[in-house]
Image (cartoon, coloured by chain):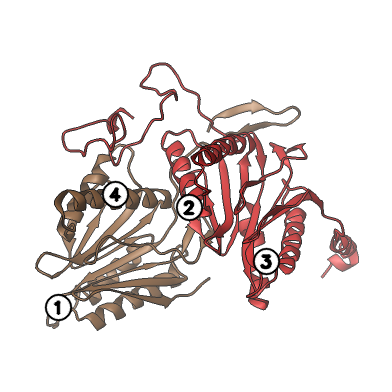
Amino acid sequence: MAHFGMDPFSAGPLWHNGPAPCGIYNFPGRPTEAAGGFIERSKQPITTGTSVMAFKFDNGVEKGVAIAADTLGSYGSLARFRDCRRLFKVNNQIILGAGGDYADFQYVQSMIDQKNIDDECLDDGFSMKPKAIYTWLTNVMYNRRSKMDPFWNNFVVAGIQDGEPYLGSVDKLGTAYEDNIIGTGLGMQLGVPLIREAFEKKPLMSRSEAQQLLVHTMEVLFYRDARSFPKYQIGIVTADGVTISDPLYLDNQKWGFALYVSLSLKPEIMCF
Amino acid sequence: MAVVETYAGYGPIQAQRFSPYADNGGSIVAIAGEDFAVIGSDTRLTVGYAINTREQNKLFRLSDKTVLGSCGCWCDVLTLTRVLNARMMMYNHEHQKVMGTQAVAQLLSTMLYYKRFFPYYVSNILAGLDENGKGAVYHYDPVGHYERNYYYAGGASSALLQPFLDNQVGLKNMENVTKEIISLEKAVAVVKDAFISAAEREIHTGDAIMINIIDKNGIREEKFALRKD
């Protein structure tokens, strides 16, 4: 990144030894190419998690955000780790959901833990709001992608911002957006349309209805996502705080339609 | 593509090469009149064939006289606009005045060229009023080439939108027309029609358009629905 140093046409650094306004900041202590020698970069995710689903709900009485992710850590196509919990309680008003590389997620988790400790040390009674985590994550992810050394994750930030439900998504490039319904991975293709259809029929949803809808969505995702798992967690954020369930199991799976398909594959029916 | 580690019992897997860029679609149209400027953008944010959100505003109010429309690689758009806002704030504190449209236009070019060898992968169109209160539209390429114009289209549907503007605003390829400067009503109607047509044929453009109308009274915002499929 030598190019992004000082040149006579550019603005000066924002602080002493800091970056120019357009430049990329190298945090002290991290290896850089300029320091000499090689640096390692992650070229692909290793142990991965699949979709995260989340949406806001509000029926006038209860409002908040519901979020879910299964607990599988895949190793390529191998279902390697069966209890990788991907919903992270950041504080009393935020849940962070993560898909993609599990090691990168744990590293980001430890960074957020340290931010929480720093926050606590200020002893001013304030803690991070969802939008703060969302913006911070966007910058962290963009910074790493600009060094061609990304955190290979999709993050979903669910929370309560000043009493109102908040939902945002950040990916490994730093692409960030807010919406009422967010799904990552296959959840964007399969889960979001299901949830949107349910909202078209019933726009005002209670907490328990939201939970039911999420269970149904996770069930459908399990049927079609080859990297999914029937064990999952549901997290709900309301103004009263954060709850993340212990792992739930998808009982009542309906494989009847598969039987139906295999029956209709009888040769005489096939000849149409 | 590099072949990496062979999994036990399975064939070699192909490494996904990391690309720092994504194409998140989106289109922008801007038209300048005598004492106003109109800029519109769609609100669809895509990645590949998937829609991230249908409600992403791509117009950034930089001042009471200047609006930037920006689309392409969304993470670059976010970063570029954030830094641009910071630079305008620095200018404001240093000179005790709001940056004019022409100055913003030059600053944006400089900022884009600063990243000449790792560019922001972004289509920018800047619309506003110049120092004489006349409508101005500036358009950019990703590495900082820029030009002032009366109308311009950028982004995913630029190849569909620009010929339409050439005909309806530039009055090109027509015989026996009297060239006159476009009215505000006509400009807004043309922006809407342009996007309706683009949304018919280009899947990365759709859902709705946000229109900002900039004149001496300030900025007015208008939303207009497009097809959502």
Q: Quadrant of the C terminus of chain A?
A: bottom right
Which residue is disc 3 drawn over?
A194
Kind of residue at disc 4: Ala
Kind of residue at disc 1: Ile
Q: Are marks 4 and 1 in contact (CB under 8 Å)?
A: no
Where is residue A263 drawn, in percent x and y? Answer: 90, 63
Where is residue B13 drawn, in percent x and y? Answer: 64, 33
Q: Is mark 2 on a helix, strand or loop?
A: strand
Q: Do the residues labelled 4 and 3 touch (CB within 8 Å)?
A: no
- Seen in the picture, residue B96 relative to B1 is either above or below; the reply is below
Q: Are marks 2 and 1 in contact (CB under 8 Å)?
A: no
Q: What element carries label 4?
A: helix
Where is residue A14 drawn, in percent x and y? Answer: 28, 38
- Seen in the picture, residue B83 relative to B173 is either above or below; the reply is above
User: How busy is the neighbourhood of tag 4: few (under 14 within 10 Å), some, or many (20 plus)?
Assistant: some
Ranked by sequence position, the earlier of labels 4 and 1 is 4
Which residue is disc 2 drawn over?
A176
Residue under the image location 52 percent in, 39 percent down: A115
Which residue is disc 4 drawn over?
B86
Residue A207 in which image quadrant: bottom right
Residue under the image location 49 percent in, 45 percent down: A137
Subunit under mark 3: A
- Seen in the picture, residue B41 relative to B186 is either above or below; the reply is above
Chain A shown in which color?
red
Q: What element carries label 1?
A: loop
Subunit under mark 4: B
Kind of residue at disc 2: Ala
